[in-house]
């Protein structure tokens, strides 16, 4: 079975704090892909990163960084020096082999509030 | 030069009515999707078309019918609307949908449907 767990429902931090959003997944596939998306209060879904199961290198993009660890089935997302504009719901998703095609299964999201 | 667009952005209607939501992408992608996001922010795939062919058809009521006149457009028609249909509906597109590789899905702005 495929599953994505984002155990943190809501996180509240003060600006400039670092914050890590957890994502734990379950899959039997050997080839799979993981994604993070951001949904700001305006409602759109914004793609942040895609990672395949064969690439365990950590990635950094500005204040954002991702830590992919197959040993713990985790793909955590860290925002360094958070800003008010980072306030959003963040979703982790897993792309898995669904037979004839691939499907995305989504976590329930973590709502991040960055307070001034 | 919006990549994935949806119309309308907001839709308020009475129970029992029939309504359509339109989606267009100008990314040259082959695959398009419809997702439903409920009030708790849970995202679920409804349908997917690849080059006008239906490839994902999740368990949704028959009142929902997708139509893809060409690979750049995927519309969603809903008959006999019910209160429980109130949600945000997202259209998305990706380069393709193959078992070998999960392409990133890019989302439209969403259509907020409220059934009264």
Image (cartoon, coloured by chain):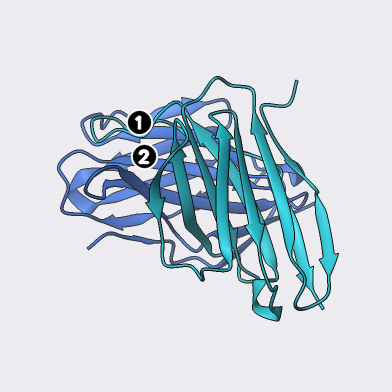
Q: Which residue is mark 2?
A: A67
Q: Secondary structure at mark 1?
A: loop
Residue A71 rendering spot, x and y as whole percentages: 17, 48
Q: Position of residue A47 (x, y in %)?
A: 55, 36
Tag 2 secondary structure: strand
**How far is disc 2 from disc 1 in space, using C-alphas?**
5 Å
**Shade representing chain B:** cyan
Relative depth, front residue between A33 and A116: A33
Q: Residue at x 61, y 68 (%)?
A: B38
Indicate the chain on which mark 2 is placed. Answer: A
For the image shown, how many numbered marks are present on the structure?
Answer: 2
> Residue A109 — which label?
none
Residue B114, percent from left and from top = 78, 69
Give the chain ID for the blue colour: A
Residue that label 1 marks: A58
Q: Nearer the viewer, residue A96 or B17?
A: B17
Q: Residue at x 77, y 71 (%)?
A: B17
Q: Is residue A25 above or below residue A47?
A: below
Is residue A42 visible in the rendered image? The answer is: yes
Whether tag 2 and tag 1 are in contact, CB under 8 A, the answer is yes
Horizontal arrangement in the rendering, residue B97 relative to residue B14 (left or right): left
Q: Chain of mark 1?
A: A
Residue at horizontal 53 percent and vertical 35 percent from the top: B93
Residue A34, located in which quarter of the rendered image? top left
Label 2 neighbourhood size at 10 Å, few (<14), some (14-19), many (20+)?
some
């Amino acid at each position: 079975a495929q599953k994505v767990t984002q155990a943190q429902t809501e996180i509240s931090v003060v600006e400039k704090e670092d914050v890590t959003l957890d994502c734990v997944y379950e899959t039997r596939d050997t080839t799979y892909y993981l994604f993070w998306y951001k949904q700001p209060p305006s409602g759109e879904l914004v793609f942040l990163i895609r990672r395949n199961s064969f690439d365990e290198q950590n990635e950094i993009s500005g204040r954002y960084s991702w830590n992919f660890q197959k040993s713990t089935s985790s793909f955590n997302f860290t925002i360094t020096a958070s800003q008010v504009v980072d306030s959003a719901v963040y979703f982790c998703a897993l792309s898995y082999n669904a037979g004839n095609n691939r499907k995305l299964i989504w976590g329930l999201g973590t709502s991040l509030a960055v307070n001034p | 030069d919006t990549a994935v667009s949806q119309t309308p952005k907001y839709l308020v209607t009475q129970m029992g009515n029939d309504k359509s939501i339109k989606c267009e992408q100008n990314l040259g992608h082959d695959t398009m999707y419809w997702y439903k996001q409920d009030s708790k922010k849970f995202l679920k795939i409804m349908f997917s078309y690849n080059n006008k062919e239906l490839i994902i058809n999740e368990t949704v009521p028959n009142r929902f019918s997708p139509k893809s006149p060409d690979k750049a457009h995927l519309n969603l028609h809903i008959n006999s609307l019910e209160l429980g249909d109130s949600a945000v509906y997202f259209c998305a597109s990706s380069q393709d949908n193959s078992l070998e590789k999960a392409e990133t899905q890019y989302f439209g702005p969403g259509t907020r449907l409220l059934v009264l």
